[in-house]
Amino acid sequence: MDYRITREDDARGVYYTLRWSPFAKADKYEITRSVPAMGGIAEVYYKDRGGKLNLFCLQRSWYGGLRAVLRERCDASIEKDPWRLSILVKWRERIYYRWTNCESFADMSDVMFFLVECSCPGAGPKSSGRFDRIFVKEIDAGKLVTI
């Protein structure tokens, strides 16, 4: 399957489609084997005791690639941020991730702006500035990969 971000634009704005990979339980060896070393956007979640997935990290990666950023965000032995580290330690057996590739840094900027603006208006990164309106459609892979 092709997990990537595609774009269509017209006079009204830009329309992105995010095709997410399936959710997978965090395992540093599986990440190394299955996640590409390409640019993209990743989400990392913890599953609470009620079984709900809770987003705790939305990350874009350009130079290091998705594989490197997910290895760091899912491995408590190399995570540097104290807050994310506390989540990894507390929920260590309940960490999940998904990702999507993106070949354009400007497109990634627009999508990150949209995703952050939806949950924390005004707190996020800037868009690329190319479009007045940004629309995003997310397509979930619809299954959980178990390791």
Image (cartoon, grey):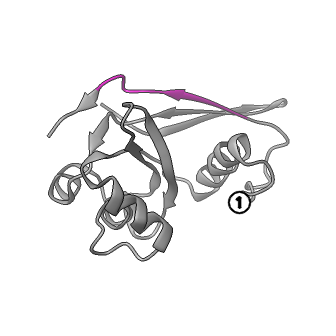
- The image quadrant of residue 23 is top left
Nearer-the-camera pick, 4 or 71: 71
- The image quadrant of residue 88 is bottom left
Which residue, as the protein is rendered here, is positioned at the far top? Answer: 142
Classify 57 as above or below 53. below
Q: Image point 75% across, 57% down: which residue?
A: 123
Give x and y (percent) for residue 18: 51, 34
Classify 82 as above or below 105. below
Give x and y (percent) for residue 84: 45, 64
Q: Image check: 139 left or right of 11? A: left
| Whether residue 70 can be seen here | no
Give x and y (percent) for residue 39: 44, 57
Point out the stretch of residues depicted in magenta. 135-143
Classify 83 as above or below 21. below
Instruction: Give amino acid for label 1.
Output: Pro
Q: Image point 78% across, 48% down: which residue?
A: 121
Q: Image point 32% across, 63% down: which residue?
A: 89
Membership of 142 in magenta stretch:
yes
Nearer-the-camera pick, 21 or 120: 120
Give x and y (percent) for residue 49: 36, 37
Membership of 23 in magenta stretch:
no
Crowding around mark 1 (Cα neighbors within 10 Å: few <14, some 14 to 19, many 20+) is some
Disc 1 target residue: 125
Position of the N terminus, as image quadrant, is top left
| Whether residue 16 can be seen here | yes
* Number of on-image labels: 1
SS of the residue under disc 1: loop
Q: Image check: 126 left or right of 85? A: right
Q: Image point 39% across, 40% down: which residue?
A: 48
Position of the C terminus, as image quadrant, is top left
Q: Image check: 51 left or right of 83? A: left
